[in-house]
Image: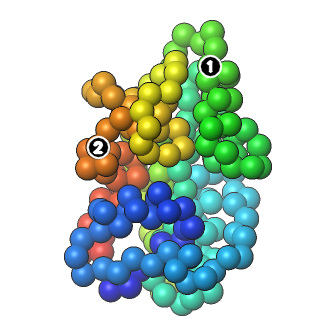
Amino acid sequence: MKLIFATHNANKFSEVKAMLPEGYELISLTDLAYHDDIEETANTIEGNAQIKAETIAAHFGMPCFADDTGLEVDALNGAPGVRSARYAGEGKSDAANREKLLDQLKGKESRKAHFKTVICYINGKEQESFTGICTGEILERECGKGGFGYDALFVPTAHEKSFAEMSSELKNKISHRALAFQKFIKSLA
């Protein structure tokens, strides 16, 4: 079965492709040469996933899914949240986002946070959403060279290494995206 993953993000695409069971062919927006901007105008992670999935499903008429992810930090009242990718501005710089987050957390006692991923799947007229949440804490400095986004700052609960220090196999079992994707895959069976 062919599935469109409504993303140009090569890191996300690789993570999801590694979790996909046999019998599915995953296609990215890059594979389809789709380069129109999809404005993520919703005020929620769920809303942005839905906007992306609906746009691509309408354009290609194939089963597709989109995800949106946010890092929600308790001491920052849930920020960066839905603005995680553009926390430091519209340039979408992971390094600038991490730097701003560390700056915003200076002097804060609590460093509790969680990643939240929502996958919106559309197949014809059917639409479903799947949520994955991974709790943890924000480090005081970056640790690790792997991963992307905020991975070098986030240590999941019951672990001692940041996502950026973990093997991709372990991350793909416990991450927010993995948890949402596992629910999504079960629904396809």
| Quarter of the rendering occupied by the C terminus | bottom left
Q: Residue furthest front?
A: 145
- Residue 104 visible within the image: yes
Coloring basis for residues: rainbow
Label 1 secondary element: loop
- Residue 127 visible within the image: no
| Quadrant assignment, res 8 | bottom right
User: Of 162 and 56, which appears nearest the observer?
Assistant: 162
| Quadrant assignment, res 71 | top right
Query: Please, what is the three-letter code of the amino acid marked with disc 1?
Result: Leu
Percent from the top left, x then y, of residue 53? 56, 72
Percent from the top left, x then y, of residue 107? 63, 9
Residue under the point 38% across and 58% down = 15
Label 2 secondary element: loop
Query: Please, what is the three-letter code of the amino acid marked with disc 2?
Result: Ser
Residue indicated by mark 1: 105
Residue indicated by mark 2: 167
Percent from the top left, x then y, of residue 48? 62, 60
Q: Residue furthest right?
A: 90
Above or below 57: residue 43: above
Residue under the point 73% across and 38% down = 88
Q: Residues within 10 Å of mark 2 (few under 14, many from 20)?
A: few
Above or below 117: residue 135: above
Residue under the point 62% across and 86% down = 59
Question: Is label 1 or label 2 in front?
Answer: 2
Q: Residue 56, which numbered label?
A: none
Given contact means CB atoms under 8 Å apart, are the residues at marks 1 and 2 in contact?
no
Going from N to C along the chain, the mark reached first, 1 or 2, is 1
User: Of 135 and 34, which appears nearest the observer?
Assistant: 34
User: Of 46 and 60, which appears nearest the observer?
Assistant: 60
Query: Total of numbered circles in the picture?
Result: 2
